[in-house]
Image (cartoon, rainbow, N blue to C red):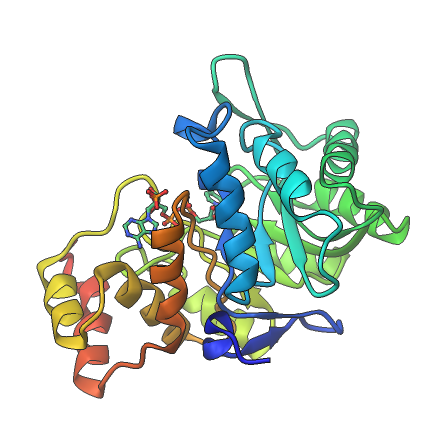
């Protein structure tokens, strides 16, 4: 079926029969300020989730540590029982303290508890894809990956992803178990992963940039504004369409708490640049324009 979200095409995760529209949605912004506590407007948060599906989104990124628990609970109460084609991707490896602080942890007991929490709050028997969130490029990924593999073999997780990782960690992880996606910080201005994206593309592994729009501080650049005017689109739409054009293994999960922004972002799925516009955008990350 043709939907606004399907305009950028579909992606099948490697070695699986699981496929999603490349235009997805990140649910983190549905929690309260600083991703802590309940949403400012719970009705709007539920409406965003419903409209995301109406627009054809079939890939929602979440975690039990958003809120904590808030986004998973909203997803369950709004969308359960889930449409057969909806892929909920979650992540583990962190927890929130009572002040809203972010704490990272990856021992076996914690990872197992985190999977149980995601299963219970999302109302699922098995999680489609779970990202193991690492802390830094030099962390040992082997031990937590063995736990991920065990949970996959036990049927708690269908597929494994990894997050906040470098190429060396990707290589170590893949020796332990197959991975279907990598979720790292990447956007028009933050391009440290250019080589990694191309390497993953060769093996058909999805690359899912977080902070696609700049996250907590929106991307700003005179060149981006100029190209957006030229293309008759918003800067956010140009930013997302640039990611979709950057490589066929990129899936986008822009976050928003508003339906108007959701509609605007999804409409970027069919935005195509002229070669001159593409060249100007490609130069932004290198020019230090942001
Ligand atoms: N693996 C990790 O460590 C990690 C880390 C961070 C995030 N993530 C995932 O990545 C997803 C995306 O990242 P993100 O939400 O942090 O950042 P983002 O998508 O780069 O940006 C979200 C921000 O942009 C605003 N926005 C969205 N659409 C807009 C539009 N059309 N016009 C103007 N402003 C707009 C949102 O505000 P409004 O709510 O007002 O629209 C929000 O402030 C998250 O939802 C989460 O699932 C993963």
Q: Quadrant of residue 115?
A: top right
Q: Residue at horizontal 48%, vertical 48%?
A: 48
Task: Estimate the x, y position of residue 249 in percent, counting from the top left.
Answer: 52, 73
Task: Estimate the x, y position of residue 107 in percent, counting from the top left.
Answer: 72, 30
Q: Residue at horizontal 22%, vertical 61%?
A: 235
| Residue 137 in sight | no
Q: In this image, 97 relative to 157: left or right?
A: left
Q: Residue furthest bottom?
A: 275
Q: Residue at horizontal 34%, vertical 53%?
A: 261
Q: Quadrant of residue 188?
A: bottom left
Task: Estimate the x, y position of residue 84 in percent, counting from the top left.
Answer: 75, 63
Q: Count how many numbered circles sit on residues in the image.
A: 0
Q: Give the quadrant of the N terminus.
A: bottom right
Task: Estimate the x, y position of residue 268 in percent, counting from the top left.
Answer: 35, 69
> Is 119 placed above or below 48 here?
above
Q: Quadrant of residue 190?
A: bottom left
| Residue 62 in sight | yes
């Amino acid at each position: 079926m043709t939907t606004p979200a399907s305009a950028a095409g579909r992606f099948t995760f490697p070695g699986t029969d699981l496929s999603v529209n490349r235009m997805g949605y990140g649910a983190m912004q549905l929690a309260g300020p600083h991703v802590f506590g309940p949403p400012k407007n719970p009705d709007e948060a539920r409406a965003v989730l419903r409209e995301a599906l109406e627009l054809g989104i079939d890939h929602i990124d979440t975690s039990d540590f958003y809120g904590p628990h808030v986004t998973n609970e909203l997803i369950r109460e709004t969308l359960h029982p889930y449409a057969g084609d909806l892929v909920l991707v979650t992540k583990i490896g962190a927890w929130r303290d009572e002040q809203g602080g972010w704490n990272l942890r990856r021992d076996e007991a914690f990872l197992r508890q985190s999977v149980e929490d995601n299963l219970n709050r999302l109302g699922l028997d098995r999680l489609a894809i779970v990202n193991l969130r690492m802390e830094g490029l030099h962390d040992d990924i082997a031990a937590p990956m063995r736990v991920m593999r065990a949970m996959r073999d036990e049927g708690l997780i269908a597929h494994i992803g990894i997050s906040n990782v470098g190429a060396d960690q990707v290589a170590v992880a893949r020796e332990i178990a197959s991975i279907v996606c990598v979720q790292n910080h990447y956007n028009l201005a933050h391009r440290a992963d250019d080589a990694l994206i191309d390497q993953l593309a060769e093996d058909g592994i999805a690359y899912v940039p977080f902070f696609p729009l700049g996250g907590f501080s929106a991307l700003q650049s005179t060149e981006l504004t100029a190209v957006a005017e030229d293309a008759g689109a918003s800067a956010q739409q140009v930013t997302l369409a640039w990611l979709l054009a950057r490589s066929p293994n990129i899936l986008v999960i822009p976050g928003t708490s508003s339906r108007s922004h959701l509609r605007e972002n999804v409409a970027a799925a069919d935005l195509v640049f002229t070669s001159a516009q593409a060249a100007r955008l490609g130069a932004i990350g290198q020019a230090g324009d942001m």
